[in-house]
Image (tube, rainbow, N blue to C red):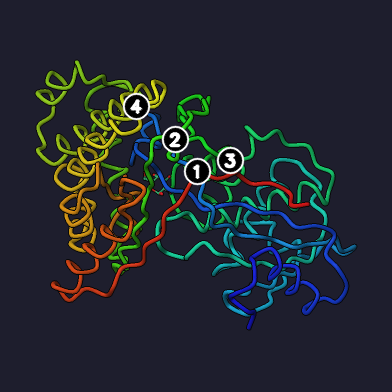
Amino acid sequence: MTDPTRAVEDRAAAGFTTQYGGQAAGRWAAPGRVNLIGEHTDYNEGFVLPFALPLRTVVAADRQDAEQWTVWSELSGETITFGADDVAEAGRVTGWGAYVAGVVWALREAGHRVPGARLAIASDVPLGSGLSSSAALESAVLAALLDLGGLELPAELQPRLAQRAENVYVGAPTGIMDQSAVIRCCAGHALFLDCRDESVEQIPFDLDAAGLAVLVIDSRAPHRHADGEYAARRRSCEAGASALGVPALRDVGVDQLDTALAQLDDEETRRRVRHVVTEDQRVLDTVALLRAARVRDIGPLLTASHVSMRDDFEITVPEIDTAVEAALAAGALGARMTGGGFGGCVLALIEADRADEVTAAVEAAYAERGFTAPGTVTVLPSPGATRLP
Ligand code: GLA
């Protein structure tokens, strides 16, 4: 067991020494993320606006001569080893090791000579909370392998490669947001990403200057069929785009929404399409307000996004809705679920000095309904994946 009071980079370095002896050649960190707004828009080739969290995954690593990868993780306490055969084909390594093997596989598939390596992983990003612990792991491993092998892969191409590891090797049909956020976010900014061409703009998100804070509330809701439901939402969106004769729902503007909805026979598809089309517009509206330094004014857009996810996309659960309602009732300027849905986290935009009150209100609402107590933390937009000094 590692000592949880030590900083994550120290735990990774110490884990390396305990497991393999000697010092690691370096340490690479990648953060978790929250999405400020723009949910289930990424695979519809639309817009998202995530920012990186101060919670990070750190990989301490060095090269080894054999074409072999040895990986220790503090989370399971296990060490796994895989070789060239295991990364010759997707899916051969399973469990958490698949995210590591998937990156090796994706790099090799893209024609890179990946060095054998010994890796030790420590993380402050909670698993299964919708904060992209998997993208953080993939991206930290990717950064380590690129540096150790002297491989060239521009930052703007790294998210696709890490996403392939997850989509093809691990087998999760997720979009491009998480890996983009983890790799391309900058401190003090939210990342405005156009998921069609992957162009980005760093949008200043200065909470301190506005006297505000973002409170992240871990709903602690058990994931209920999240994978199957995610895939089902994706299929509905594709069906909607196909019925409307457009390449992706991104191509339907809010001004065309009524006409588009009138063309769809299926009521459920209509709701799904309405969420995506209005959500893309909410991202654009949020970006416009942030560009004008009107941080406070984005609150209603966050809440409208939540209502749309609850009523039209139907991806929220009672714990999540309770957290949002309690935060708003306690004075949050806006609140919404963040991430794929069916559990995970809520974010609330609050006055900086009201974190305790809002936290207490959410805890009380949870206690009243008999839910497992939520976790809360205030966060600032933090740096993306990087090599540590
Ligand atoms: C998960 C996926 C992302 C994105 C979100 C919903 O986090 O990994 O690609 O689709 O859900 O916005």
Name the one closer to the observer, 160 or 87: 160
Rounded to the nearest whole Å, what is the CA distance between mark 2 and mark 1? 13 Å
Name the one closer to the observer, 68 or 208: 208
Amino acid type for the residue under numbered disc 2: Ala
For the N terminus, the image quarter is bottom right
Rounded to the nearest whole Å, what is the CA distance between mark 4 and mark 2? 11 Å
Q: Residue at x 20, y 48 (%)?
A: 331
Left or right: residue 373 compared with residue 197:
left
Near mark 3 (Cα within 10 A), the count class, few <14, some 14-19 or many ≥20, is many
Who comes first in sequence, dot 2 or dot 3?
3
Who comes first in sequence, dot 3 or dot 1?
3
Amino acid type for the residue under numbered disc 4: Arg
Rounded to the nearest whole Å, what is the CA distance between mark 2 and mark 3? 31 Å
Q: Is the residue at mark 1 in contact range of ligand 1, meaning its CB lies under 8 Å from it? A: no
Coordinates of residue 124 in the picture (x, y in percent): 55, 64
**257 shown above or below 72:** above
Secondary structure type for disc 1: loop
**231 shown above or below 223:** above
Amino acid type for the residue under numbered disc 1: Pro
Coordinates of residue 125 in the picture (x, y in percent): 51, 61
Near mark 1 (Cα within 10 A), the count class, few <14, some 14-19 or many ≥20, is many
Quadrant hosting residue 25: bottom right
Rounded to the nearest whole Å, what is the CA distance between mark 3 and mark 1? 19 Å
Coordinates of residue 156 in the picture (x, y in percent): 62, 32
**253 shown above or below 82:** above
Secondary structure type for disc 4: loop
- Residue located beneath label 1 in the image: 381
Mark closer to the observer (2, 3)? 2
Q: Residue at x 35, y 24 (%)?
A: 247
Q: Residue at x 70, y 33 (%)?
A: 154
- Residue located beneath label 4 in the image: 294
Who comes first in sequence, dot 4 or dot 2?
2
